[in-house]
Image (tube, grey):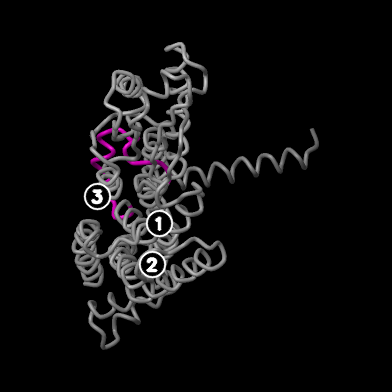
Amino acid sequence: MNISLQRFLRHLYFLCQKELLSLFKDPRMRIQLVMPVIIEGFLFGYAANYNIEEVPYAVVDNSGTASSRDFLAHIEAAPTFSCTAVCGNVQEVSELIDAGEILGAVVVPEDFEKKLLHGGQAPVQVITDGRNPMIASMVTNYIAHIAADWSAAGGFAHETVTIETRTWFNPNQLSRWTFLPSFLAMIAFVQVMFLAGLSIAEEREQGTFDQLLVTPFSPTEILIGKATPPVIVGLFQAAMVFLIARFWFEVPFAGNLFTLLLTLFIFMVSTTGLGLSISSVAKNMQQVLVYLLVLMIPMVLLSGLVTPIHNMPEFLQIITYADPMRFVIDAVRRIYLEGAGLCDIAWDFVPMLAVAAVTMPLAGWLFRHKTT
């Protein structure tokens, strides 16, 4: 082997050894390198579940015959579905879908058995919640397969029971109708967390933090000054996404603009508190970036943006109640697609306000603690 190449490889070995030793020398760095991978590996395995299981649905049996009961029992026997309500009419179904208690409904018409006995097609209406078009499409396809199996088992023609689809809030099941409204909250979340998280750490690295402390401003005033710009920038960027969604992609906006902005504002205040708390604890910008990624990835996974929350294990569903992303995603989708008002989404405000009530004082305490 060439002597110069040997020298190069030896130098490279010592440099890599030095860097690895410096990385693992700090106990906190060892934790930062190992724990996030373990936590996020388990979270992705449990939370990122695209299979639909025990989908809550309702039935409306207008036929009330032996055939309709047998057909509905065939659906209920499938592990994919879980019948949570028996409704008397479609209006009751509407109320349950609006409340998020069910993701769909099966409506059997009055003449269902009569058409079966006469050898004609017996249409069954499947109503789905278009706020999650992927689940809506999968639910429709599953029920269509079940209907075909039931027809074949009963000796009917393969297409005797036909499925008529009715999708609420998103008639064409377009994914952008759901994703773009959710992206309003997502872009605000990412920008606010990074801007707030880096603000104090950046001052420390640039050496201007001590200069800021000798100004006539109190720590509380400095903290509020640090918190306000990220919220303003987040609202501005959310407004840009709203304009793109509404006027370029023509996603119809059914709600009130003030309600939408108020929801985003409350959410951004809560996430600003998280970002400032991280920035107050971290010693440098590198630590801030690590902490932000460790916190943000689970928050997005548990928000229901990627996969439905009801698909997650029960213990993760409980944890999602501490995630403000869960509630802002739900609120923004309902405002944008349903036209929900303040009274309709009031319960979504409670967890976000609770997080803000904890994180903002915590950020203030950490900031004052670090400056004294």
Q: Quadrant of the C terminus?
A: bottom left
Residue that protrudes farthest toward the bottom in the picture? 216
Q: Quadrant of the N terminus?
A: top right
Q: Are marks 3 and 2 in contact (CB under 8 Å)?
A: no
Which segment is the magenta one? 306-325
Q: Residues within 10 Å of mark 3 (few under 14, many from 20)?
A: some
Q: Quadrant of residue 62?
A: top left
Q: Are marks 2 and 1 in contact (CB under 8 Å)?
A: yes
- Amino acid type of the residue tagged 2 in the rendering: Ala
Residue appearing at x 44%, y 20% in the figure: 118
Find disc 3 in the rendering and name its residue. 322
Viewer-side label of 3, 1? 3
Q: Earlier in the sequence, mark 3 or mark 2?
A: 2
Find disc 2 in the rendering and name its residue. 201
SS class, disc 2: helix
Q: Which percent across, then down, holds residue 32?
A: 39, 46
Residue appearing at x 59%, y 42% in the figure: 14
Q: Are marks 3 and 1 in contact (CB under 8 Å)?
A: no
- Give the alpha-carbon distance from disc 3 to disc 1, as whole Å: 24 Å
Majority secondary structure in the magenta region:
helix
Find disc 1 in the rendering and name its residue. 287
